[in-house]
Amino acid sequence: MRTRRIVSLLARLPGVGEKTAQRYLLFLATADPAIARDLGLELAQLSEHVRPCERCGNLAETENAGVGAICEICSDAKRDASLLCVVGRVHDLIAIERSGAMRGRYFVLGRLLSPLEGVGPEDLPIGALVDRIREDGVTEIILATPPSVDGEATALLLKRDLAELGVRMSRIASGVPHGGDLEFADPITMGRAFFGRQNM
């Protein structure tokens, strides 16, 4: 049946289970038909007009199918090209952008070092990252990989492989979240909160 097929397709989306997929289907089937029609049209053209940015890996839009795209951040002349923030995924880039704390540019690795998933150093775009650092005259690299085992391993690998470039490298601090209770913080997070403390 068509409804089962749609539920099955929607359930493939991250964070969407079968019940949520059914709710989406019921909404689209009973709402204004223009909503489903417009959504379907945009999704059908998604791969033609939204693709990874050629320079950083962020999402970029283009009006011409088959033509390369540069994202808004890379094309923003007001951004500091000498400051490069390296992230694991586009999700991380979006989270950092929401904070408004980063005025430089980004490089998205697309994955993290993960031996358990078969992702080794050769699977990371380190060559492209080195080229970007040299082309843009980057003077500082901020390693903003997540504070997980894979994120830490990736940061250490990048620190080792980029050391010969002589560029300043820093790692984002991690600690107790705003509004969080200290009693629920794990030992690693608490240790980093103390290590990354600042003068008042």
Image: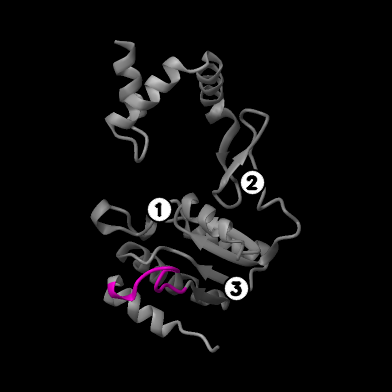
Q: In this view, does 71 lie to the left or right of 89?
A: right
Q: Is residue 155 left or right of residue 17?
A: right
Q: Name the spot of residue 135 as percent of width and height, x first.
A: 66, 62
Q: Which amino acid does label 2 sit on?
A: Cys
Per the image, the residue denoted by label 2 is 71
- Label 2 neighbourhood size at 10 Å, few (<14), some (14-19), many (20+)? many
Q: Judging from the image, what secondary structure is the residue with disc 1 in?
A: loop
Quadrant of the rendering where the N terminus is positioned: top left
Q: In the drawing, what numbered circle is on residue 140?
A: 3
Q: Judging from the image, what secondary structure is the residue with disc 3 in?
A: strand
Label 3 vs 1, first from the N-terminus: 1
Between the residue at mark 3 and the residue at mark 2, the CA separation in whole angstroms equals 21 Å
Q: Do the residues labelled 1 and 2 touch (CB within 8 Å)?
A: no
Label 1 vs 2, first from the N-terminus: 2
- Label 3 neighbourhood size at 10 Å, few (<14), some (14-19), many (20+)? some
- Over which residues does the magenta segment extend? 173-183
Between the residue at mark 3 and the residue at mark 1, the CA separation in whole angstroms equals 22 Å
- Label 1 neighbourhood size at 10 Å, few (<14), some (14-19), many (20+)? some
Q: Which amino acid does label 3 sit on?
A: Glu
